[in-house]
Amino acid sequence: MTTTGAERVQRRSERSRRAILDATYELLDEVGYQALTIEAIAARAKVGKQTIYRWWGSKSAVVLDVFLERSSSAVPPDGPTLDVTLKRRAERFIEVFHRTPLGRNLGVLLGEAQADDELRAILVDQWFGPRRESIRSTLVEAQERGELRSDLDVDTIIDAIYGPLWYRMAFAHAEVDVAFAHEVVDAVLQGVRAAGS
Amino acid sequence: MTTTGAERVQRRSERSRRAILDATYELLDEVGYQALTIEAIAARAKVGKQTIYRWWGSKSAVVLDVFLERSSSAVPPDGPTLDVTLKRRAERFIEVFHRTPLGRNLGVLLGEAQADDELRAILVDQWFGPRRESIRSTLVEAQERGELRSDLDVDTIIDAIYGPLWYRMAFAHAEVDVAFAHEVVDAVLQGVRAAGS
Amino acid sequence: MTTTGAERVQRRSERSRRAILDATYELLDEVGYQALTIEAIAARAKVGKQTIYRWWGSKSAVVLDVFLERSSSAVPPDGPTLDVTLKRRAERFIEVFHRTPLGRNLGVLLGEAQADDELRAILVDQWFGPRRESIRSTLVEAQERGELRSDLDVDTIIDAIYGPLWYRMAFAHAEVDVAFAHEVVDAVLQGVRAAGS
Amino acid sequence: MTTTGAERVQRRSERSRRAILDATYELLDEVGYQALTIEAIAARAKVGKQTIYRWWGSKSAVVLDVFLERSSSAVPPDGPTLDVTLKRRAERFIEVFHRTPLGRNLGVLLGEAQADDELRAILVDQWFGPRRESIRSTLVEAQERGELRSDLDVDTIIDAIYGPLWYRMAFAHAEVDVAFAHEVVDAVLQGVRAAGS
DNA sequence: CGATAAACGAGACGGTACGTCACGTCTTAGA
DNA sequence: TCTAAGACGTGACGTACCGTCTCGTTTATCG
């Protein structure tokens, strides 16, 4: 068997990668996305700046990696009925947004992404994508069970729930509560439930 | 003491104010919010940096002023029915977001505002506020005419329409189209229309 | 009388200029030309790097300014005879080269200047030039008094004295002594003295 | 212990040594001593940086090696008389200094050496030393033949010729010409020739 | 004829300094 | 008193090289 390719030697240092991501996470929590600097990350991680630029190239790229790595993709357990499941999901969403270091910076990051196509693509595909997928499959199952009208686009249902939540949080950071989430879920389900259910 | 009233010797220069806001608008269009600098605004406006700091104090404050000044608060004419009116409004919203210099930077600005309470307060109160108010009054009138169920919170209806639109635009900048807006409006109206109408 | 031109406001800060030149002088003494950095000068002088780059543009330019400012152009008093005068001058030259912070870095600076035409031009014109001129006038007077042969180029005489001194110092930094200087002066005078003197 | 001598398994690679010295020579010509970097040498020579550091340890050491290897120690043929011989030597010196890649960087290298004792020692001993020795023996022979005064230090004569040349070249890179060299040689010989010759 | 150990190319690494950019504050002369 | 101009101290940017290091991969004796 012949080895294909020249294969690089002295591969990327896992130690440095970890230190950088950890330092970024800490600083994100301490000072927030906007005040975060590559310089500070490098200093905290005891790493040369070049090492960061070698593998990421920008602040947003590092932060994105932290998001992808640290965000729990764990999902609250399904409830007895569809509405309970969806409410739990929505509650978790609000909770993460308000209480975790990453969540608190998610809005800023998405704002940044409005002017950076690459960033937005990754953020949407890798972060929001999988989370959305998980809810979609729940809804599709419900649809297949006949609980939801079969003529509706599942994606639209998701937007109908999370859109209002996100919108409110963006405008009134502190005030979005569980009650509103429940209200939204109920209203949406009201409209999409199959006739007989 | 003889002179009553203010004896300030030189008042704020209107010429400078205009030049600054105009330069900011142009640069916002040309380079976008993130790449915008006070330095560049001052240079373009042929104004001392101090003059900007004296009256505004930060990049976001100037930009906000431009938003408040330049954003047309004109509203599309009401249609024959409520759904047409709402659809026109939603279309206008999407149009502004995608096609105007200010709209294109609105997402970034709101992102910035996530970490700046003062900025968010002004943005929400002065910019989104009036626009929301206009829609609210339309809805309230409809409610009073008996077209909408009277037990519903009008604000929730607004969020139910604009939330999904905003959410989609944030994630898929280029793809949100008029059809989706119509779909959303229809779906929401479906759920909120009074029984007999 | 009308003022011509727009005349800059907020003129160059003398305080900063002084601090930079002083810091450079100290560091030149402490670490030498090669280890000197703009960063260190700025730090020592409590000055922004930009301020240095604004007015000088390179390490060598700052150092040159220090040379021009700090080098005493004082000349040892003339002796009773030409040879004593010239010997005193040569001794002073050696002394400066070996014992002063500037002198110790003069050789390196001239080396640097071999690859930088602008630097060499200034160094030669402003630093070596005046010193050479002073000796030249001494020699010209002697020539006019009939002490030196009138057919000789005075510049060549200067090179004949300082060339060997410099050459030796460049190669054997520590060993050039007063005796060698005397020897050189004597030998040169031997060859250039007018017949009858 | 049975094996006498070194049992190293792989000796220094001649291929690498050559590539490094050649690359250094080329770069010295192209960008000059100051802009030369180990990194660039390694890249041009297709060699690991470590290989350079293993055998030389610094930029100046490599360059020095190039000097020692590439500098022709060929000497112009002796002329019919001492003054012709010396003039030819001086001309060759000027020629090398102005026209060859190494010569053009010799001044900078000697400048560097003013602050680096080891470098200066090697440069003086290995490069200038042999060249000086060659001239010294010419002069000593002349002295033994009775052409030169026997009371003079031959080294001083050498300094008296090459000092002024070097001095002029350092200050006025482009202007030192053959005529000046002749003038200097003539003047020095004038003063050192034995009475009867 | 392997085995084996040093030298090798590649290039990642922690650093230092570079020269630039923009920040927000200041000083100055003129309107 | 406000303004245009722009110098100032500060701090982060992204890049270039430094000298050290860790990898497989030659390569050339020696057991």
Image (tube, coloured by chain):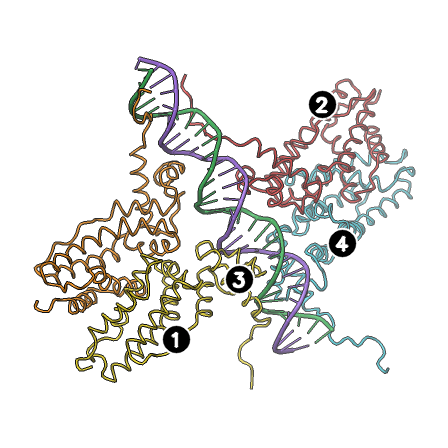
Chain colours: A red, B cyan, C yellow, D orange, E purple, F green
SS category of the residue bearing label 3: helix
Find disc 2 in the rendering and name its residue. A137
Q: Nearer the viewer, mark 3 or mark 1?
A: 1
Residue D171 is situated, as x and y percent measured from the top left of the image, at: 32, 65
Discs 4 and 2 share one subunit: no
- Amino acid, disc 1: Val
Drawn side of residue D114 relative to residue B146, left or right = left
Cα distance in 3D space between marks 3 and 2: 69 Å
* Mark 2, other Cα within 10 Å: few <14 / some 14–19 / many ≥20: few
Find disc 3 in the rendering and name its residue. C23
Cα distance in 3D space between marks 1 and 4: 81 Å
Task: Decide which of F3, D154 is in the foreground and name it.
Answer: D154
Cα distance in 3D space between marks 1 and 2: 94 Å
Q: Nearer the viewer, mark 4 or mark 2?
A: 2
Circles 1 and 4: CB atoms closer than 8 Å: no
SS category of the residue bearing label 4: loop
Residue B189 is situated, as x and y percent measured from the top left of the image, at: 82, 36
- Amino acid, disc 4: Ser
Drawn side of residue C152 relative to residue D33, left or right = left
Give the label on residue A184, or none: none
Find disc 4 in the rendering and name its residue. B73
Drawn side of residue B97 relative to residue A14, left or right = right
For disc 1, the chain is C
Discs 3 and 4 share one subunit: no
For disc 3, the chain is C
Depicted A52 relative to depicted D101: above or below: above
Discs 1 and 2 share one subunit: no
Cα distance in 3D space between marks 4 and 2: 41 Å
Q: Nearer the viewer, mark 1 or mark 4?
A: 1
For disc 2, the chain is A
Cα distance in 3D space between marks 3 and 4: 60 Å
